[in-house]
Amino acid sequence: MDRRQFITRAGLGAATAGLGTVTAAGAAAAAETPSDSGPTAQGTDAGRAVLTGAQQWAADGWTALSGYRVGVISNPTGILIDASHIVDSMVASEAVDIAGVFGPEHGFRGSAQAGEAEETTSDPRTGVTVYDAYGAQEAGFMRMFAEAGVEVVVFDIQDVGARFYTYIWTMWSAMRAAARMDLKFVVLDRPNPIGGTAAGPMLFPGYESGIGQRYIVQQHGMTVGELAQLFNAEFLPDDAGAVVEDLEIVELRRWRPDSRYADTGLPWVLPSPNMPTPDTAQVYVGTCLFEGTTSSEGRGTTRPFELIGAPYGTYHWADDLNAAELPGVDFREAYFVPTISKHIGKVCGGVQLHVTDPDAFDPIRTGVTMLTTLKHLYPNDFSWRGGGTSDGFIHLLHGSDRLRIMVDAGASADEIVASWQDELAEFDQLRQQYLLYRGRR
């Protein structure tokens, strides 16, 4: 099936007219460009750390933004190697006229919990106006950009590689607004902490939401810069009736898609309150599926998305999961008491995931196996968030009702994973032309 057929089947219509509009260096050309520092560039000292897009422009005094009214979309992860924030650096440089900062879910400075944001206010440190952009769609961004007088939009947020992590959809909505308003859009690229492999099911038409607005797979395997190129060429022509004519991706240097975050030499900042470590990101794309159940996904513990359980859980779950011999992971019987979200103050029995081999570990297969095993062990206790109805949250996470139907019917994890392989292969083929770092070792 070719790309046009794939997009049509997903309900997108043909988008080939926008393929030549990206002004950043093309993915194909970038793929042929060797890393500037060779295979030894993954040292953990600051001098050999991966260079983010932000680090490169900060080193040049932010001169690329001089003379423009700049709108910055960022959160606490928008930092430099010394842990200073890019907005603070821009203000200190006196080279950038910041029209406003636009805070996503959890807010610009990160004070809000899941599903919450910071109110529009003046930033105490810099005096810059910070707009509440969480949940803003195209019209909302257009209104805020116009009010602030934005001429150039700069996006700098650490993603974690999962379709249902909301920051990429903040970028998508802002790009739609930029396309309509003919604004320059800059992505200061950052590593994908779970690498460059695509995995999992496609989001299908009819299941769009704030945690999945367009048709990509659960583990997209792309950086935000690569996603921006795909969004611009494949989705914007139909959705916004225009593309971002001036899209610039400030590419990473010294980064390989097969590297681990610990190898980047970069500090880790919580992208959200329940993403405390790169280890969390590694399992999140699979275990976040438990947000679609009444089981606890470990929110309100020190190991969210690694601790999974429910008041009815027992040691049998860990035993059955270890018997499944999933690659790269062991399961420890665990008990915990959540302080927020589900089952507050109740003892939950379940498991803690211990990733033993990151290269072999398959987070989505693992998450599906955990679901099927839990359902099999406790058929009278296991339940879906929302009761398994047609609008259940699991459908939004998975991208369709297929997972719920198959789990409820007693399908095995292997059968469920096999059900999406064709659509995954089609998406993987589609995304190849937008990859900026493939071939780097």
Image (tube, grey):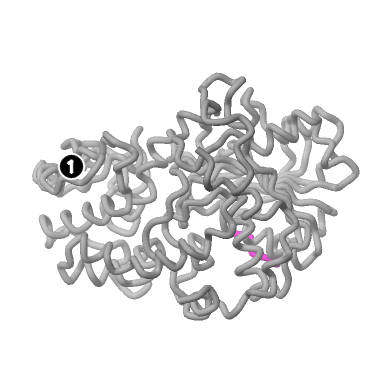
Relative side of 72 to 276, left or right = right
Measured along the vertical axis of the image, is residue 68 above or below residue 335? below
- Image-quadrant location for residue 405: bottom left
Residue 73 at least partly seen: no
Bounds of the magenta span? 135-139
Relative side of 223 to 356, left or right = right
Frontmost residue, 170 versus 361: 361
The verdict on residue 137 being magenta is yes
- Image-quadrant location for residue 420: bottom left
Secondary structure at badge 1 equals: strand
Q: Position of residue 251 (x, y in %)?
A: 65, 43
Mark 1 neighbour density, 10 Å: few (under 14) some (14–19) many (20 or more): many
Residue farthest to the right? 67
Question: Residue at left 57%, top 39%?
Answer: 110
Question: Residue at left 31%, top 40%?
Answer: 306
Q: Position of residue 172 (x, y in %)?
A: 62, 60
Question: Residue at left 67%, top 55%?
Answer: 26
Relative side of 350 to 16, left or right = left
Position of the N terminus, as image quadrant, is bottom left
Frontmost residue, 68 versus 110: 68
The verdict on residue 237 being magenta is no
Q: Position of residue 75 (x, y in %)?
A: 61, 41
Q: Which residue is mark 1?
A: 349
